[in-house]
Image (cartoon, grey):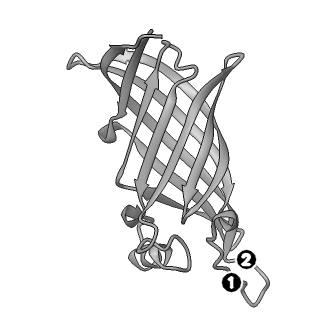
């Protein structure tokens, strides 16, 4: 059996999240530093093992004060928990792809299933083989100890508990290895 290793092409990938603010609008944030790999034994990535991490200190919501608050103990506590990690597998369920595994955030590990749109495989102008994925899902931030909350005088929640995860990932094919069964 041949296993192919793929790594995230950071130049052509982004890791973002969206959270409702005051229940009326959405704030988008990004992790600017991240890395990940996939190890596949098939061209359709079914059963591929996925490993991913993002540096909490690289969070960017385009507003420095908010970024500082998100890195604080009120939210991610970057000083004590500098990374979020995910380990899982890609499952092809009748043509519907899911990324199923465990996410660890702020020292808490929970199961997480994400929807995956596999864009296919293509060669780039430099002779590299790339694979593309759009990945989306949701989690409850309070499940991971990100429990800061406030309510306005009018009763609006300042930050929603539900967080949408949106990843646009391009992988670069590395050397394939034959593995004895």
Whole-percent x, y for residue 160 in the image? 69, 68
> Which residue corresponds to mark 2?
157
Identify the mark at residue 52; answer none if there is no mark: none
Which residue occupies 79% across, 83% down?
A: 155
Q: Is residue 41 above or below residue 49?
A: above
Residue at the bottom extreme of this rendering: 153
Q: Dot 1, crowdedness within 10 Å: few (<14), some or many (≥20)?
A: few
Residue at the right extreme of this rendering: 155
* SS category of the residue bearing label 1: loop
Q: Dot 2, crowdedness within 10 Å: few (<14), some or many (≥20)?
A: some
Q: Is residue 163 above or below residue 180?
A: below
Q: Is residue 119 above or below residue 114?
A: above
* SS category of the residue bearing label 2: loop
In terms of sequence position, does the residue under pointer 2 or pointer 1 come before the other? 1
Whole-percent x, y for residue 75 in the image? 55, 74
Looking at this view, is 143 or 2 the one in front? Answer: 2
Q: Is residue 9 above or below residue 160?
A: above
Q: Name the quarter where the N terminus is drawn.
A: top left
Q: Quadrant of residue 114?
A: top right
Which residue occupies 42% across, 45% down?
A: 14
Which residue occupies 44% across, 25% down?
A: 39
Asked if the residues shown at circle 2 and circle 1 are in contact, with their CB atoms under 8 angstroms apart, the answer is: yes
Looking at this view, is 61 or 7 the one in front? Answer: 7
Which residue occupies 49% across, 34% down?
A: 50
> Which residue corresponds to mark 1?
150
Label 2 and label 1: CA atoms lie apart by 6 Å
On screen, residue 46 versus residue 123, left or right, reads right
Whole-percent x, y for residue 63 in the image? 42, 72
């Amino acid at each position: 059996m041949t296993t192919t290793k793929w790594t995230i092409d950071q130049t052509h990938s982004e890791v973002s999240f969206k959270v409702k603010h005051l229940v009326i609008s959405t704030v988008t944030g990004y992790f600017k530093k991240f890395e990940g790999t996939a190890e596949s034994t098939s061209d359709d990535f079914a059963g591929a093992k996925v490993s991913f991490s993002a540096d909490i200190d690289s969070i960017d919501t385009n507003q420095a004060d908010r970024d500082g608050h998100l890195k604080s103990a009120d939210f991610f506590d970057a000083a004590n928990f500098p990374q979020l990690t995910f380990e899982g597998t890609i499952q092809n369920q009748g043509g519907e792809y899911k990324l199923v595994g465990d996410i660890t955030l702020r020292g808490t590990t929970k199961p997480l299933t994400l929807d995956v749109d596999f864009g296919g495989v293509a060669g780039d102008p430099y002779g590299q083989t790339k694979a593309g994925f759009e990945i989306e899902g949701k989690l409850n931030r309070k499940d991971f100890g990100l429990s800061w909350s406030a309510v306005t005088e009018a009763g609006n929640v300042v930050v929603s508990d539900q967080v949408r995860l949106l990843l646009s990932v391009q992988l670069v094919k590395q050397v394939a290895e034959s593995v004895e069964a």
